[in-house]
Image: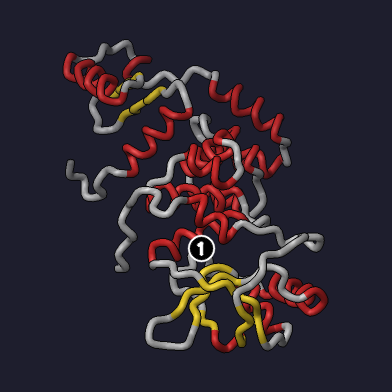
């Protein structure tokens, strides 16, 4: 298994890295940055740390057609390969692939001395800057930058020119079940639909209904609210049984540690039950997600 990059501080600074990868590829992009040099396409090699593995052929053909007409407006970012005259692509692999389809012999590049950690960081940032990302891909990019490199939501918002609420709302989508996330990736649910389902007791069932009935975001919000307001009393409460002292003590300990309201409803005579944690702010939810994500997988504490 590859070793994940160590968490670190901001290093040379997220904004400094953003200065290299932030770009506008629109047709009217004015005053592109000057490239260091023009190099043959065969001298470049792909980045093995590139987090994006899917390069749809149709999209590459469209980009190649644009490159034939206008050339490459935005230079690729590369770094030297030690002991070789090759250059490794840090950002711009799509442009490199499309340039070969367009039969361009040379591409403009900017050479930077990035280390392996910065290469991965830049690759993630470049993917986030792409306009065709779906909400789940963007959310995963934010989570990678936070978990791998220790960036905060505030730093990301500042460097990426996005609002903190935008980043926080996207990160909340990662708490949804996998099948609901898949519907967002497939374009069957928008980010607005998905956000409305987050607090639902059964987001998967509601998501299927939203897709089947073609509900709007507002209709989805009303549906999720109506379902959430229905009383869902556990069997142990419905049967009139009182919680034992150990359960109440465990609730108190968890509530004190998390600084959130925790309720445990254990079904009598069995080993199943319902654990409910109520959060009051998005910061509370983010903290809870981090706590749960850091728990060991083998059940040890």
**Foreground residue, 269 or 86?**
86
- Residue 192 visible in the displayed image: yes
**Foreground residue, 60 or 69?**
69
Packing grade of label 1 (10 A; few <14, some 14-19, many >=20) is many
Return the x and y of residue 273 as percentages of the image width and height: 31, 29
**Foreground residue, 69 or 38?**
38
Q: Residue at x 55, y 35 (%)?
A: 164
How many discs mark residues in the rendered view? Answer: 1
**Foreground residue, 213 or 284?**
284
Q: Is residue 133 left or right of residue 245?
A: right
In the rendered image, the vertical position of residue 28 relative to residue 275, given as above or below: below
Q: In this view, does 168 lie to the left or right of 71?
A: left
Residue that mark 1 sits on: 123
In the rendered image, the vertical position of residue 249 relative to residue 151, given as above or below: above
Return the x and y of residue 272 as percentages of the image width and height: 29, 32
Q: In this view, does 196 lie to the left or right of 143?
A: right
Quarter of the picture containing the N terminus is: bottom left
Quarter of the picture containing the C terminus is: top left
Q: What element carries label 1?
A: helix
Q: Residue at x 57, y 56 (%)?
A: 19
Q: What colour scheme governs how the chains and residues are painted in the rendered image of this protein?
A: secondary structure
Return the x and y of residue 217 as percentages of the image width and height: 69, 34
Q: Residue at x 50, y 41 (%)?
A: 171
Q: Which residue is drawn at 33% across and 51% down?
A: 8
User: Which quadrant holds residue 22?
Assistant: bottom right
Return the x and y of residue 212 as percentages of the image width and height: 68, 44
């Amino acid at each position: 298994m590859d070793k994940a990059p160590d968490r670190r501080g901001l290093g040379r600074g997220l904004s400094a890295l953003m200065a290299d990868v932030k770009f506008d590829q629109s047709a009217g992009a004015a005053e592109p940055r000057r490239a260091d040099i023009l190099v043959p396409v065969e001298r470049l090699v792909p980045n093995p740390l590139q987090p994006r593995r899917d390069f749809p052929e149709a999209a590459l053909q469209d980009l190649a057609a644009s490159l034939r007409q206008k050339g490459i407006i935005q230079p690729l970012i590369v770094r030297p390969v030690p002991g070789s005259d090759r250059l490794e692509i840090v950002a711009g692999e799509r442009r490199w692939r499309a340039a070969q389809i367009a039969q361009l012999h040379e591409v403009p590049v900017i050479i930077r001395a990035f280390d392996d950690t910065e290469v991965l960081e830049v690759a993630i940032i470049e993917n986030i800057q792409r306009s065709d990302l779906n909400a789940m891909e963007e959310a995963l990019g934010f989570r990678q930058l936070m978990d791998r490199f220790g960036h905060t939501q505030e730093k990301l918002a500042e460097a990426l020119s996005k609002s903190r609420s935008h980043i926080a709302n996207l990160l909340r989508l990662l708490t949804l079940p996998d099948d609901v996330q898949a519907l967002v990736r497939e374009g069957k649910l928008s980010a607005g639909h998905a956000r409305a389902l987050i607090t639902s007791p059964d987001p998967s069932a509601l998501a299927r209904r939203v897709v089947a009935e073609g509900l709007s975001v507002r209709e989805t919000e009303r549906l999720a609210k109506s379902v959430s307001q229905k009383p869902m009393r556990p069997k142990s409460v419905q049967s009139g049984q009182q919680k034992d002292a150990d359960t109440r003590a465990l609730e108190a300990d968890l509530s004190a540690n998390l600084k959130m309201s925790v309720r445990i409803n254990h079904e009598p005579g069995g080993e199943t039950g319902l654990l409910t944690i109520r959060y009051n702010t998005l910061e509370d939810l983010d903290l809870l997600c981090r706590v749960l994500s850091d728990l060991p997988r083998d059940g040890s504490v």
